[in-house]
Amino acid sequence: MIKMIRFILDTSIFVNPEIRNRFGDNPTEAMKIFLEYAERLFGRVEFYMPPGIYKEVSHFVELEEVSPDIELYIIKKPPNVHDIRIPAFVVYELIEDIRRRIDKGLRVAEKAVRESVVDSQNVNAIIQKLRRNYRKALREGIVDSKEDFELILLAKELDATIVSADVGILTWAQKMGIKWIDAARFKEVLDELIEKA
């Protein structure tokens, strides 16, 4: 018996313009084309989304334009958070990462204060730069939402492959031994699966 291939889908496939354009010009068009792939692979490949990710996607995709196919081909399933065990080293590493990021964010803020003292005319520009750099220092490369964590947990539970363009999700998937595909290559993977079928 052939093992079912399972993918856990992230919002970035349909929302991130660089990734989405492989499927369509806008999120709704990208979802329509993806669902055509899902239909052709039905019975051999399963596509999952945790409810939080599905909710995020629904803010960008016109659901009435992709219904009922989205209900047929994308399985909405929350991870079983009560039975999944996470190794302690993951929590230790997360704590260390958060501490490093807080220190890095503090240095970004200190630099902005120094710049504002020197150039008080451009305070608004300095604040915008501070926000951009602070966000980058604290959030880039980390799992920073419940929805991201749900993707990882569901992939672990189902022994599935995460599909995302989010560096934080892919980094933590790798640390936890979870299979992943960069969303930039996902369409090629689907083309290959269809060709093999």
Image (spheres, rainbow, N blue to C red):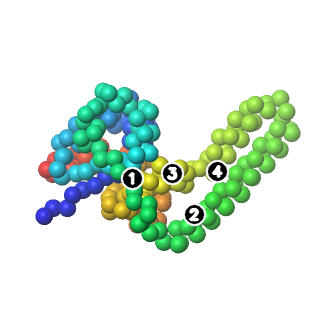
Q: Counting other residues with Cα less than 10 Å from the Cα at mark 2, is it few (<14), some (14-19), or many (20 or more)?
A: some
Which residue was labeled with disc 3? 146
| Drawn side of residue 189 relative to residue 82, left or right | left
In the image, 138 versus 65, the foreground residue is 65
Quarter of the N terminus within the rendering:
bottom left
Determine whether the residue tagged by mark 2 lies in a helix, strand or loop: helix
Circle nearer the N terminus (3, 2): 2
Circle nearer the N terminus (3, 4): 4
| Drawn side of residue 68 relative to residue 85, left or right | left
Which residue shows up at 44% across the image and 60% down it?
A: 81
At label 4, which amino acid type do we have?
A: Ala
Numbered disc in front, either 3 or 2:
3
In the image, 52 versus 17, the foreground residue is 52
Q: Counting other residues with Cα less than 10 Å from the Cα at mark 4, is it few (<14), some (14-19), or many (20 or more)?
A: some
Circle nearer the N terminus (2, 1): 1
> Gap between marks 3 and 2, in whole Å?
14 Å
Q: Is residue 178 shown to the viewer in this render?
A: yes
Circle nearer the N terminus (1, 4): 1
Determine whether the residue tagged by mark 3 lies in a helix, strand or loop: helix
At label 3, which amino acid type do we have?
A: Lys
Which residue shows up at 84% across the image and 34% down it?
A: 119
Is 3 situated above or below 75? below
Q: Counting other residues with Cα less than 10 Å from the Cα at mark 3, is it few (<14), some (14-19), or many (20 or more)?
A: few
Q: Are marks 2 and 4 in contact (CB under 8 Å)?
A: no
Which residue shows up at 40% across the image and 35% down it?
A: 58
> Gap between marks 1 and 4, in whole Å?
30 Å
> Gap between marks 1 and 3, in whole Å?
11 Å
Which residue was labeled with disc 4? 137
Circle nearer the N terminus (1, 3): 1
Q: What is the number of the mark on residue 94? A: 2
